Amino acid sequence: MLGVAAATGLLILLGAWWMGPSLFGSSSGPERVFTDATVTSPSDCSDADAQETVRFDLGGRTREGRLSGCGHDQDEQVRIAVAQDATSSGSPVPVALAATAPGVSDLRRPVGLGLLVLSCASGGAYAFLLARGPRPGLVRPSAA
C-alpha cells in the first residue's frame, strides 16, 4: 500500500514538472526591460486611482511613463519595468515598479515544486496510516 502512495506522488510530481513553468505562474507575456526612472509628477496616496508620471531613458531616447502608484517624491529615483512592445508608442507608456513586475522572482517554480513534494509526502503518509489502521495495544479501553 505504501508503494501505491509513493508511485502516485511521483506521478503527480512528474506531471507537474512536465507542465513546465506555467503551472506555478505564467512566464509567457511581454518581455520587460528594467531601467531607472525619475518621478516627474508625484501623486498623493489619498487618490483612488493614483498614477504618477515618470521620465526614463530607453534606447537612447527620453520617454515618459505612467506609474500606477503613489507616495514618491518629486525627482525621486525608482526602478521600473517597461514592456518592450510598449516602447514604440509616442504617448506615455504604462510602467510598473521593477520589484512588483511579473517574472521578477525566479523562486516560484522551485518553491512551488517543494510545496508539492511536501503535499504528496503528507498525503501518502496519511493514506498509509488510514490503510494500516490503529495499532493494537495503543488503544486504551474506556473506563466504564
Image (cartoon, rainbow, N blue to C red):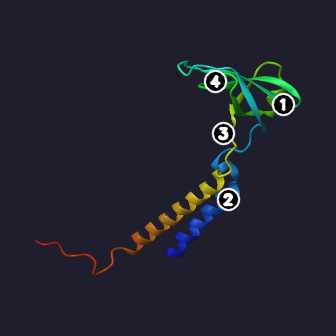
- Which of labels 3 and 4 is toward the front? 4
Alpha carbons under labels 2 and 3: distance apart? 26 Å
- Which of labels 4 and 1 is toward the front? 4
Q: Residues within 10 Å of mark 1 (few under 14, many from 20)?
A: some
Q: Which residue is mark 3?
A: 99
Q: Which residue is mark 4?
A: 73
In this picture, residue 30 sits left or right of residue 50:
right
Quarter of the image with the C terminus in it: bottom left
In this picture, residue 62 sits left or right of residue 97:
right
Q: Vertically, is 100 above or below 136?
A: above
- Rendered image quadrant of residue 137: bottom left
Q: Residues within 10 Å of mark 4 (few under 14, many from 20)?
A: some
Say which amino acid is labelled 2: Trp
- Which of labels 1 and 2 is toward the front? 1
Q: Which residue is mark 2?
A: 17
Chain-order first, disc 1 or disc 2: 2
